[in-house]
Amino acid sequence: METYKREFIEFMVESDVLTFGDFTLKSGRRSPFFMNAGAYVSGGQLKRLGRYYAQAIHDRFGDDFDVVFGPAYKGIPLAVVTAIAYHDLYGKEVRYCSDRKEAKDHGADKGQLLGAEPHDGERVVIVEDVTTSGKSIDETYPKLMAAADVRVVGLMVSLDRQEVGKGGTKAAIDEVSERYGFPTAAIVSMSEVVEALGGTVITPELAVAIEAYYKQYGVSA
């Protein structure tokens, strides 16, 4: 496992973004772990978060892109910090763009998007915290494509939960990839989390609970 991935896993735990216990998810599933990206609240946390996204994008999608797009609302700060980190780490100037839940009908920046205006022929990387159903992409992808004839290089999320999406057979990020035709990736997967934290944060009892959860909801179940 790459060093930055192991560091990111530890960072999620330290930031109380990834927690373990007994949680009832919005889907109704009872899960032994829970991720809340809203717990990244400080300048230092956001700076580190942007660097992890930038490293993962560099590794998986390369440097040939122009814009980082973050779906509202949680994707807005993700797009900003990723663009900053990409410049710091790789010396590449990329712009950020996000959508609005409601279009702005006045001012110089009126419309569906905020930040950089995408142009025909540009390449875009989408960033999200986690994809559980693909709903946010379903809502924002049409806005992005209506703004300009761009090519989406890929979608990067922070954690691949590796459980079946709404289709019942594939992971949610794989469903998005199949639906829209662009690659999807995560900084880390849940199996990598278990590998990194096994025997420490993840106790033997918790490991049993996670295994049972994936027997029921895992993509290989």
Image (cartoon, rainbow, N blue to C red):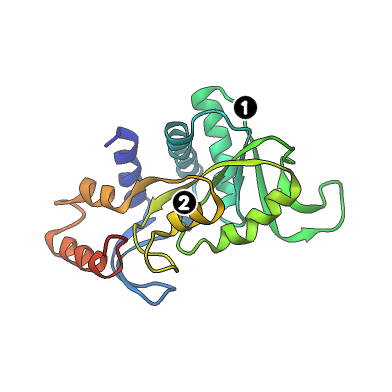
Q: Where's residue 202, x and y in %?
A: 20, 56
- Residue at position x 49%, y 30% from top? 62
Closest to the observer, 12 or 177: 177
Q: In this image, 142 relative to 104: left or right?
A: left
The relative height of residue 51 versus residue 91 in the rendered view (above or below) is: below
Q: Residue furthest top?
A: 91
Q: Could you tell me which secondary element the residue under label 1 belongs to?
A: loop
Q: Where's residue 19, x and y in %?
A: 32, 60
Give the quarter of the figure containing the N terminus.
Answer: top left
Could one spot residue 220 in this view of the protein?
A: yes
| Mark 2 and mark 1: Cα distance apart in space | 24 Å
Q: Are marks 2 and 1 in contact (CB under 8 Å)?
A: no
Closest to the observer, 214 or 209: 214
Q: Amino acid at mark 2?
A: Tyr
Q: Which mark is residue 93?
A: 1
Check disc 2 and report the residue beneath it: 40
Q: Amino acid at mark 1?
A: Glu
Q: Could you tell me which secondary element the residue under label 2 belongs to?
A: loop
Q: In this image, 8 relative to 82: left or right?
A: left
Could one spot residue 51 in this view of the protein?
A: no
- Residue at position x 85%, y 58% from top? 105
Q: Where's residue 136, x and y in %?
A: 57, 60
Q: Where's residue 74, x and y in %?
A: 56, 55
- Residue at position x 27%, y 60% from top? 220
